[in-house]
Image (cartoon, rainbow, N blue to C red):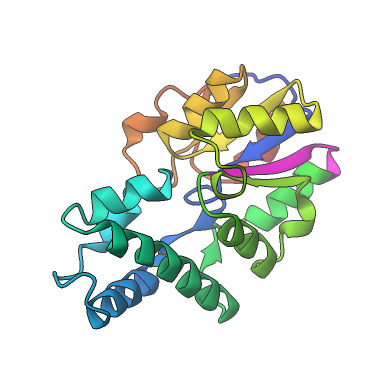
Amino acid sequence: MTELKLRKPEAVIFDMDGTLFETDTLLIPVHNRVFETLRAEGLYMHETPPVDRLLSCLGMLLEDIWRQVMPDSTEAARQRADVLLLQYELEGLAAGEGKLYPFVEQTLRELKDHGIKLFVASNGLEDYVKGVAEQRGIAELFDGLYSAGEYATASKVDLVARLLQDHGVQNAWMVGDRSSDVEAGKGNGLQTIGCAYATYGRASEIAGADVLISDFRELTRLLEQ
């Protein structure tokens, strides 16, 4: 953990994928199903792209993800992939696939016990973000679950700005694993915490965060400094 004394926040805002949720535990089987269905429907006849390509795009808006994952696809294929991805993710979550990172629920409850308001700000789809929180039993801990899919924001900076305005939050920590999370925090005058335990992005993406953590429990220790 990088040593830096942070101001105690009134709220902590979390990214979802790569921060709270260990996304590859759900996404690897889903990824294969999506491309099997696209081929069966005649929409994408190439081999399944490497799943690492999809994982490396987590944190982007969905329309940008598909352009990276299958640049040789049609708009129809990308739109169908949107539908299939959400359908198979929700089915997988309901079947018990996908897990939170270690100590996430415990730490969220500890932060809540300290009187901290908790939020999610994700570039994902509304039903997916809410589905993860509900299926993994943490939805009740949050004061708001914000997604680009619900609010049609062009960037995470805009999404976090909307969240702060809606709830009158002045002082918060932004916690995430991608450059978009650091930018969203700094763009709104927040202190930023980078999750170095996530493997989906490059380490350089969170190098600009105020603090780096390698274990989710370090959030409680930062709060108690």
Percent position (x, y) of residue 136? 65, 66
Q: Main secondary structure of the magenta part?
A: strand
Vertical placement of residue 217 versus 53, above or below: above
Viewer-side residue, 69 vs 29: 69
Percent x, y of residue 40: 25, 83
Tell me: 202 left or right of 220: left
- Residue 64 image position (x, y, % from top left): 34, 45
Query: Which residue is located at x 52 percent, y 47 percent?
Result: 19
Q: Between 145 and 216, which is closer to the camera in this rendering?
A: 145
**Residue at position x 65%, y 59% in the image:** 130
Q: Look at the image and give the residue range highlighted in magenta.
A: 113-122
For the question of whether residue 199 can be seen, the reply is no
The quadrant the C terminus occupies is: top right
Q: Is residue 209 magenta?
A: no
Q: Residue at x 21, y 62 (%)?
A: 50
Q: Is residue 153 above or below residue 80?
A: above
Q: Quadrant of residue 43?
A: bottom left
Percent x, y for residue 200? 36, 48
Q: Quadrant of residue 79?
A: bottom left
Looking at the image, is 199 positioned above or below residue 38? above
